[in-house]
């Protein structure tokens, strides 16, 4: 049995973590912490937690050594402030922000300015927490960088194909996300009026997930060049991500053969579903930790469209964090998911 803490429990991803851990059979104690909402009950932030009377404590009162694992569901730049103390403690850590997702300071500085990274020397040493790719490394890690939502869908959608070394380097990712991806603080401004009955692109060629996607795809491609054109959009729905990914194949491969390749690659992955005939869609993955992938080729079998869908709050954030927690604490990876 384990004792865990959630820092930033009142945000969208924090609330999802609470909902999942309440039903976890191996967690016997959970404490919730907040920077701005201490003293309030967690049920104030979700109708789904109406029977939960846990109270948010102030982050200044946390004692890291009291916990087997701590989740940080906080804004970018938070965990780095506690990194040295966390590393000295016995606790394990899962950071749902971007502090340790990128491998080098140059990429951090370019995309997360004006936040100055406080531990740039360790960036390349922190394990990227995508279980389907890095499971064995995650199991033995003290701190994990939980992947971004857009990168999760993109990497899972492309990984089997990159292993084949059969695609030209330019990859177009047309991504659409529900507005919960912007976070609770943004949603509670006039942002919600802007997205009502609307559909809009944002941060083209400047999105913070762009270098994360390219970095991890290049690792899978093992030295082969990968050039990603990433176009994110916001949908007028609360949750869910659908990415339409376009690639040109060097050698023709038919749809059935591609599906066979993907099914073989993910044959032991409980949370990955390869669709045979249907198109992947958001409604099928909402409130699950699943990633659904469908593959579509043109008449020449040399142009491929990949549809990859996830729930951005679960497989794109909190569900994946629970997956990582289970691995790090030695539990069945599927528990509470």
Image (spheres, rainbow, N blue to C red):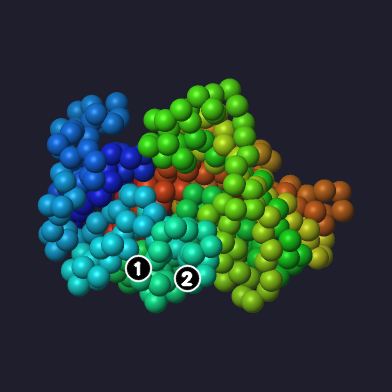
The answer to whether residue 61 is above or below residue 226 is above
Which quarter of the rendered picture does the N terminus lie within? bottom left
Residue at position x 53%, y 54% in the image: 208
Q: Examine the rendering and report whether any part of residue 204 can be seen.
A: yes
Residue 167 appears in the rendering: no
Spatial CA span between label 2 and label 1: 10 Å
- Residue 326 in the image: state x and y as whole percent: 31, 57
Q: Where is residue 66 drawn, in percent x and y?
A: 12, 59
Q: Specify the farthest residue to the right.
A: 300
Among all residues in the image, which is located at the extreme front?
Answer: 114
The part of the image, by quadrant, that contains residue 12 is top left
Dividing the picture into quarters, in which one does residue 229 lie? Answer: bottom right
The residue indicated by pointer 2 is 105
| Residue 335 drawn above or below residue 47 | below
Which comes before the other along the chain, label 2 or label 1?
Answer: 2
Residue 99 shown left or right of residue 43 in the figure = right
Quarter of the rendering occupied by the C terminus: top left
Whether the residues at callouts 2 and 1 have beta carbons within 8 Å, the answer is: no
- Residue 250 location in percent, x, y? 80, 65
Lateral position of residue 323 relative to residue 43, left or right? right
Residue shown at 57%/33% (left/top)? 235
- In the image, taking residue 198 as reference, residue 247 lies left or right, namely right
Question: Residue drawn at (24%, 49%), measured in percent from left and top?
Answer: 6
Relative placement, left or right, of 130 versus 171 is left
Secondary structure state at the residue bearing disc 1: loop
**Residue 128: mark in rendering:** none
Residue 261's x, y, as percent? 66, 60
Which class describes the residues within 10 Å of circle 1: few (<14), some (14-19), or many (20+)? Answer: some
* Residue at image coords 18%, 34%: 40
Read off the residue under disc 1: 118
Secondary-structure class at tag 2? helix
- Mark 2 is surrounded, within 10 Å at the Cα level, by few (under 14), some (14 to 19) or many (20 or more) other residues, namely some
């Amino acid at each position: 049995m384990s004792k865990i803490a959630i820092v930033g429990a009142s945000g969208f991803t924090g609330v999802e973590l609470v909902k999942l851990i309440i039903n976890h059979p191996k967690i016997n104690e959970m404490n919730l912490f907040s920077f701005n909402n201490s003293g309030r009950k967690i049920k104030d932030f979700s109708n789904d937690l109406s029977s939960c009377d846990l109270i948010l404590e102030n982050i200044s009162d946390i004692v890291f050594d009291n916990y087997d694992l701590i989740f940080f569901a906080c804004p970018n730049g938070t965990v780095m402030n506690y990194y040295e103390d966390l590393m000295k403690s016995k606790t394990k850590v899962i950071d749902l922000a971007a502090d340790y997702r990128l491998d080098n300071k140059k990429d951090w500085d370019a995309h997360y300015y004006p936040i100055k990274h406080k531990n740039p020397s360790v960036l390349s040493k922190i394990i990227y927490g995508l279980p389907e790719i890095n499971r064995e490394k995650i199991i033995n890690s003290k701190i994990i960088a939980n992947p971004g939502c857009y990168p999760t869908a993109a990497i899972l959608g492309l990984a089997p194909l990159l292993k084949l070394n059969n695609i030209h380097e330019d990859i177009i990712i047309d991504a659409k996300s529900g507005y919960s991806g912007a976070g609770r603080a943004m949603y509670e401004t006039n942002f919600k009026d802007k997205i009502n009955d609307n559909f809009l692109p944002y941060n083209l060629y400047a999105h913070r997930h762009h270098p994360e996607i390219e970095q991890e795809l290049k690792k899978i491609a093992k030295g082969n060049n990968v050039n990603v054109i990433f176009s994110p959009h916001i949908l007028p729905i609360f949750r869910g991500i659908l990415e339409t990914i376009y690639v040109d194949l060097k050698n023709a491969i038919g749809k059935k053969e591609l599906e066979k390749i993907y099914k073989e690659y993910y044959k032991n992955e409980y949370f990955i579903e390869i669709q045979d005939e249907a198109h992947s869609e958001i409604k099928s993955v909402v409130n699950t930790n699943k990633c659904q992938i469908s593959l579509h080729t043109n008449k020449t079998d040399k142009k491929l469209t990949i549809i990859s869908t996830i729930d951005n709050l679960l497989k794109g954030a909190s569900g994946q964090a629970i997956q990582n927690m289970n691995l790090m604490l030695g539990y069945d990876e599927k528990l509470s998911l």
